[in-house]
Amino acid sequence: MQLSSQQSFNQALVRLAVLLYQIDNKVTLTEQDYLEELVNSLEWESPICPEAFLNDVIYQTRKALDTGVAMDYLREFKDDLSFDAHRAMEVAMTITGVDGNRSEEETEILSLLTHKMLAKALVNGSRANQQPAATP
């Protein structure tokens, strides 16, 4: 089954959120609560239920972190995040700050997202949302 662009984005968003809350090896209740709210807020259009998908993502993310390939893992779904780069950055900023402390690892991923992986989509998206200047 071919997933819609929106569903691919939703799944990438969940993967990003899980990566960011696990990257510092400190999972807080506020991070878990935010992740649960995020998953529940998404319109899910997949034959795999959100809970099963989330469980698999937690496992895959932990495996990527344990083997030192977290950045390669992130690159796997960066294109799907470009579907709504601003929303992706909103989620990334929120989940990394919800516990009141951004780790060095979290900050590194935020920088990578804004300056490399999503930079073009963020700039193009910003231009699309700007109102044309009024002419006299």
Image: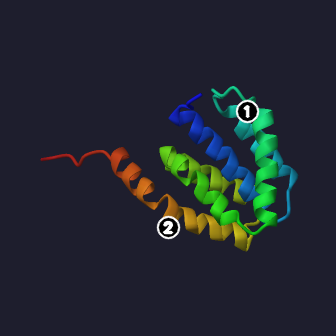
Q: Is residue 51 above or below residue 91?
A: above
Mark number for residue 115?
Answer: 2
Q: Is residue 56 left or right of residue 78?
A: right
Give the spatial CA distance, label 1 vs label 2.
29 Å
**What's the residue type where badge 2 is placed?**
His
- Under tag 1, what secondary structure? helix
Write the residue at 72% across / 67% down: 102
Q: Is residue 114 left or right of residue 120?
A: right
- Under tag 2, what secondary structure? helix
Mark number for residue 15?
Answer: none
Q: How many marks?
A: 2
Residue with the most extreme bottom position: 104
State whether residue 99 appears in this view. Answer: no
State whether residue 69 appears in this view. Answer: yes
**What's the residue type where badge 1 is placed?**
Asn
Q: Is residue 126 left or right of residue 65?
A: left
Residue contact at pointers 1 and 2, CB within 8 angstroms: no
Q: Where residue 26 appears, x then y in whole percent?
A: 85, 62
Q: Is residue 104 above or below residue 77?
A: below
Mark number for residue 40?
Answer: 1
Q: Where residue 112 appears, x then y in whole percent?
A: 57, 67
Q: Where residue 10 appears, x then y in whole percent?
A: 62, 39
Q: Where residue 60 appears, x then y in whole percent?
A: 77, 52
Q: Quadrant of the N terminus?
A: top right
Residue with the most extreme front position: 1
Write the residue at 79% across / 67% down: 67
Ranked by sequence position, the earlier of labels 1 and 2 is 1
Between 85 and 45, the one lying in front of the other is 45
Write the residue at 79% across / 43% down: 56
